[in-house]
């Protein structure tokens, strides 16, 4: 029987060094870089909250204590805001603060890949399905990507991978899935391949950084041999799990910003600024003027 147990927990692998954003990431974790006025990780957590996630599991590394502090009460700040009657700011902080006991942190002591980071969360997740959200990726859509995945999961159960379409001649740059029968807003996945050679991709649907996985992935990752980059690859583990469990692809139709890359980070800031009624009037004309000067 296909497993359809409720997905209550989400894993966020935030142990990466963020070398593409040096020197800024010497002092600030890449997940805490701001898009307009919120750190990247807040957008990803908000997506999980919209989908009904109840417990948030962060797999951290050295110098990531700022993330723990961010999801905690800041007594001195709140006291100052209270004394200055900054009610709007206090409300904003209260909305951002998770419920007590709903956030857990564990360490990935060595940078051994995404598969290893997921495995490090095994004791907190336990024997239940869980969501996995890569914190570099900010999704913008209605519904949110993870919410759409949850809806598909309620129909199909098993494992869900969010995918998007790319130009066929660009498929060699991504992890690509094979397409089977249609299921709701997605399809049955028949296979997966990481960065296929040009002309050999089974489709043009690429994996975009959102997953719902069954707990059996942990025992697979525990014994998983190192793959590309001499790291424990999640895709390799999912391929093994595909032999015994169903996988479905949820086709996300919104916008995705890869904030792990400088161009994606800049585009996210521009896009989210233009969506804000309080900011757009002040920046739209300046954006247009800047582009005009550069042409």
Image (cartoon, rainbow, N blue to C red):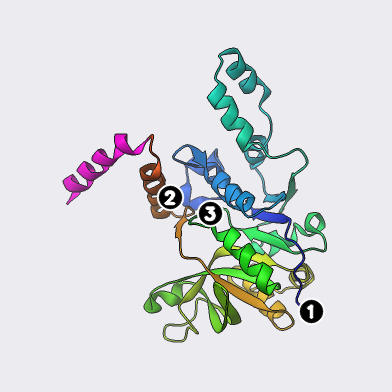
Q: Which of the pair 207/234 is nearer the observer?
A: 207
Q: Is residue 97 magenta?
A: no
**Image location (x, y in percent) of residue 84:** 56, 14
Secondary structure under tag 2 reads helix
Residue assigned mark 3: 136
| Badge 1 density bin: few <14, some 14–19, many ≥20, Cα 10 Å | few
**Image location (x, y in percent) of residue 9:** 73, 55
| Magenta stretch secondary structure, dominant | helix
**Image location (x, y in percent) of residue 172:** 45, 77
Quarter holding the N terminus is bottom right
Quick one: label 1 or label 3, which is nearer the N terminus?
A: 1
Q: Which of the pair 15/243 is nearer the observer?
A: 243
Residue 265 is marked as 2
Q: Is residue 288 magenta?
A: yes
Q: Which residues are magenta?
A: 279-295
Q: Which corner quadrant of the image does residue 168 belong to?
A: bottom left
With respect to residue 278, does 223 lie above or below? below
Residue 1 is marked as 1
Label 2, label 1: how far apart the Cα atoms are: 42 Å
User: As drawn, is 109 to the left or to the right of 29?
Assistant: right
């Amino acid at each position: 029987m296909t497993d359809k147990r409720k997905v209550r927990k989400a894993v966020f692998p935030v142990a990466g060094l963020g070398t593409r954003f040096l020197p800024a990431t010497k002092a600030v974790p890449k997940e805490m870089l701001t898009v307009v006025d919120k750190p990247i990780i807040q957008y990803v957590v908000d997506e999980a909250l919209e989908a009904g996630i109840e417990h948030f599991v962060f797999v951290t590394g050295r110098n990531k204590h700022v993330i723990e502090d961010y999801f905690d009460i800041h007594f001195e700040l709140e006291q100052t805001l209270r004394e200055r009657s900054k009610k709007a700011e206090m409300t904003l902080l209260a909305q951002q603060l998770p419920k007590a006991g709903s956030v857990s942190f564990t360490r990935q002591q060595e940078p051994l890949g995404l598969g290893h980071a997921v495995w490090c969360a095994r004791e907190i997740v336990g024997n239940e399905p869980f969501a996995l959200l890569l914190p570099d990726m900010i999704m913008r859509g209605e519904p949110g990507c993870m919410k759409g995945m949850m809806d598909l999961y309620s129909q199909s159960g098993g494992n869900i991978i969010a995918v998007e379409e790319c130009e066929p001649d660009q498929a060699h740059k991504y992890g690509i899935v094979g397409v089977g029968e249609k299921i709701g807003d997605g399809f049955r996945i028949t296979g997966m391949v990481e960065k296929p050679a040009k002309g050999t991709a089974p489709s043009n649907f690429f994996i975009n950084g959102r997953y719902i996985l069954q707990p059996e992935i942990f025992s697979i990752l525990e014994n998983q041999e190192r793959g590309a980059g001499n790291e424990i690859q999640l895709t390799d583990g999912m391929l093994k799990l595909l032999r015994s469990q169903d996988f479905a692809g949820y086709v996300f139709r919104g916008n995705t910003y890869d904030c792990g890359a400088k161009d994606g980070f800049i585009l996210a800031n521009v896009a989210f600024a233009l969506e804000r009624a309080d900011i757009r009037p002040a920046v739209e004309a300046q954006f247009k003027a800047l582009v005009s000067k550069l042409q």
